[in-house]
Amino acid sequence: MGPFDRAQWQVLSQSLQLARAADRDVDYAVDTQALLDVDRCRKWLDSVGPMIGSPSRVVTASLLAKRIAFLVTGPSLYAMSAFDLGLNLARDNCITEYAHRDGLWQSRMVLKDLAVDRPGEGRRSEWRERVIRRVFAEHLTPLWATLHEACGIAPRILWENTAVRVFSLYERRLAKLDSERLRCQARDDFDYLMHRAPASVFGLPEHPLVRFFSAASAVAARDVAPTGAGRDGAPPRPAVRFRKTCCLYFMATDPAEYCSTCPLIRPGVVKPV
């Protein structure tokens, strides 16, 4: 377990799919650094597409990006906010798994080196910025740029795929930490990430996540609830923050299925045939 205690490793490995290099799935794993080669990235998209029922590279790229965004941001930001541990998310330290079986992703984020860094006394803000820079500017931003070049997928789809993972991590998982001190720390980390972090930590001229952050809609949630839910006195579904872009999941399903926050199922929107 390296620098982690048993409870920490259980969360990171079981709930957030972090893995050691010795445990990687050798049949479905690729060095993350290699994916920055556009030609290799295209071949990777072409090999993964049939596994997930995708009709095109663009759809494959979007669905892969949703999974990769979870695998990168989940363990790294959770370790930062809940454990004050900084994972080494450098691309040359990462192996991306992409196994997909029985309609479900079986992939993990594999680290060759499990060493971590910790904030110095009174210097957590500086340390936090470095951790976030490793996650975004040094990992996801170049990878999303390569996916865009490889197949033409709109960057805004890739970044909203990332944003929804970050929102869920902080609003659902980290909000349930047992310690009030850690819940406050996680809230401050989320506020920093969304409202105070400079665009440079993302390696971009503008903050790529904030445009997707909006208030959830309780009314819309009732409108799109299954028959009976939220109507005729039945309890409404929880509020929904509808996406601004479609992740294209419906194009890889037959019959078409839509994510619960898909903009195509908002009231008044006509779904594609």
Image: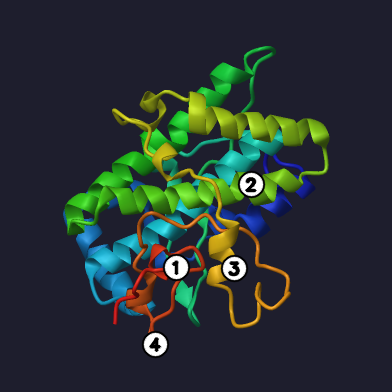
Cα distance, mark 3 to mark 4? 24 Å
Residue 177 x, y percent position in the rendering:
77, 44
Q: Looking at the image, is mark 3 or mark 1 earlier in the sequence?
A: 3
Reading the image, the residue beneath label 2 is: 171
Disc 3 residue type (three-letter): Arg
Residue 224 x, y percent position in the rendering:
53, 72
In the image, what residue occupies the spot 28% across and 72% down?
47
- 52 displayed left or right of 20: left
Q: Is residue 36 visible?
A: no
Q: Secondary structure at mark 3?
A: helix
Reading the image, the residue beneath label 1 is: 267
- 187 displayed left or right of 91: right
Up the image or down, 188 lies above or below 51; here it is above
Disc 4 residue type (three-letter): Pro
Q: Looking at the image, is mark 4 or mark 1 earlier in the sequence?
A: 4
Q: Return the residue nearer the eye: 220 or 6.
A: 220
Q: Which mark is residue 255?
A: 4
In the image, what residue occupies the spot 33% across and 40% down?
141
Q: Nearer the viewer, mark 4 or mark 1?
A: 1
Q: Is residue 32 visible?
A: yes
Q: Looking at the image, is mark 2 or mark 3 earlier in the sequence?
A: 2
- The residue carrying pointer 4 sits among few (fewer than 14), some (14 to 19) or many (20 or more) residues within 10 Å by Cα, namely few
Give the residue at the far front of this rendering. 232
- The residue carrying pointer 3 sits among few (fewer than 14), some (14 to 19) or many (20 or more) residues within 10 Å by Cα, namely many
In the image, what residue occupies the spot 29% across and 52% down?
35
Q: Nearer the viewer, mark 3 or mark 4?
A: 3
Q: Looking at the image, is mark 4 or mark 2 earlier in the sequence?
A: 2
Cα distance, mark 2 to mark 3? 21 Å
Disc 2 residue type (three-letter): Glu
Q: Nearer the viewer, mark 2 or mark 1?
A: 1
Q: Secondary structure at mark 2?
A: helix
